[in-house]
Image (cartoon, coloured by chain):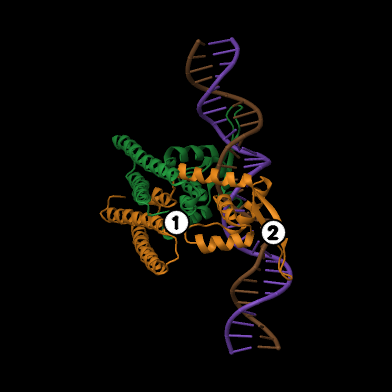
Chain colours: A orange, B green, C brown, D purple
Amino acid sequence: MATRLVILGLLREQSLHGYEIKQIIEEHMGDWTNIAFGSIYYALGKLEEEGFVERVATEQEGNRPSRNIYQITEHGQIEFLRRLRELWRVPQRQYFDFDLALFFIEALPREEMLSYLRGRVAGLEATLAHLDAHQADQDALPEVPPIANAIFEHSRCHIEAELAWTQDLLSKVEQGLYP
Amino acid sequence: MATRLVILGLLREQSLHGYEIKQIIEEHMGDWTNIAFGSIYYALGKLEEEGFVERVATEQEGNRPSRNIYQITEHGQIEFLRRLRELWRVPQRQYFDFDLALFFIEALPREEMLSYLRGRVAGLEATLAHLDAHQADQDALPEVPPIANAIFEHSRCHIEAELAWTQDLLSKVEQGLYP
DNA sequence: CCTTTATTATTCTACGTTGTATATTCTACC
DNA sequence: GGTAGAATATACAACGTAGAATAATAAAGG
């Protein structure tokens, strides 16, 4: 969805081919994005059609698959800023598939539900623990940009919110507030 | 994504045609789902292929477009429970496009960023106020199922978390903690 | 060494989403 | 009584996503 923006943003720094873009995304944004590599090639094709990106070379090392190197155009620079500003301006609404599970709550026996809820609480607690451990590792390294912390905190605060809400729901179900 | 589950869940109660399903989704789940009506027809076709749903009639009122009425099959009942249990069991990870805006933070001047951040805080506060007002209206009606409250609280707690995080980010940027 | 596995780099297809197009009928209002 | 707009009902094409298929080379392990 934001694949185009990411590609334009990365190409601002230097020209790249698809596979390199994929690697940068995995290494630097892998923890908090889910851009499938297939989408990268599609987006590159589209950006080229739209004139935001140009193919500047087709290299090949030995008999390896040849690679197409792309460069951002001036229109691309403008388009990047346009998309970036839109991201800052327009808040995105979040939807939760799990709400559907609640909507159809009477379809499963109470006991089964309770066990799933307890599993969810445990899972979320484990995620938080895992996240914090991972973060402690990161803190040891000096070269991590400060903004990475904000992104980390972003995930963390939503997981905490989810945990608190799930615990509340669990206790209400235990009290028999839902049929 | 969860379109198939919704359709199966609704057809458990009674046979329906696509447009009716669309209306029920809009009326009862419109606030917390985003299923495009086009997806309903696609999902119905797929569910029929898979044998989870059967076309039982093609009605027509006057010269109105004719409508295809679908019924859930026994396999469909099982499939519904399978998908529902998966929803209870498997927690979904959330991704935030806005993190990209942070990732490319040096692309925009500090002052512009600050004004977007303030706008976001204001927007989230307004959303919360609007949500609570809407909820007060709902509370006045007696026929709303109790689970609707849990779903409402779910959205609310995440918006609150987002607000708190954004305020924190804003204050850190104001303090000059990010370049 | 030789075999298994990982890496490089892209193409291609199946799948699902979104909204536009279409064509009729009912409603509302001047 | 005419006409603008909302409601009924689906089909369909354009778009984007996700991952399997491909095909060559480098690395690793016994």
Are the residues flagged by discs 2 and 1 from a single subunit?
no
For label 1, the residue is B87
Give the left or right position of residue B39, taking residue A62 as reference.
Answer: left
Q: Classify mark 1: helix, strand or loop.
A: helix
Q: Is residue A93 above or below residue C24?
A: below
Dot 2 surroundings within 10 Å: few (below 14), some, or many (20 or more)? some
Q: Are marks 2 and 1 in contact (CB under 8 Å)?
A: no
Give the x, y percent position of residue A11: 60, 54
Give the x, y percent position of residue B116: 43, 42
User: At 36% from the left edge and 57% from the top edge, which residue is drawn?
Assistant: A113
Give the x, y percent position of residue B29: 43, 42
Q: Is residue D17 above or below residue A59?
A: above
Q: Nearer the viewer, mark 2 or mark 1?
A: 2
Quadrant in the rendering for residue B144: top left
Which residue is most to the left?
A: A175
Dot 1 surroundings within 10 Å: few (below 14), some, or many (20 or more)? many
Q: Nearer the viewer, residue B150 or A128?
A: A128
Q: Amino acid at mark 1?
A: Leu
Quadrant in the rendering for residue A143: bottom left
Q: Amino acid at mark 2?
A: Asn
User: At 63% from the left edge and 57% from the top edge, which residue is drawn?
Assistant: A15
Q: Which mark is residue A68?
A: 2
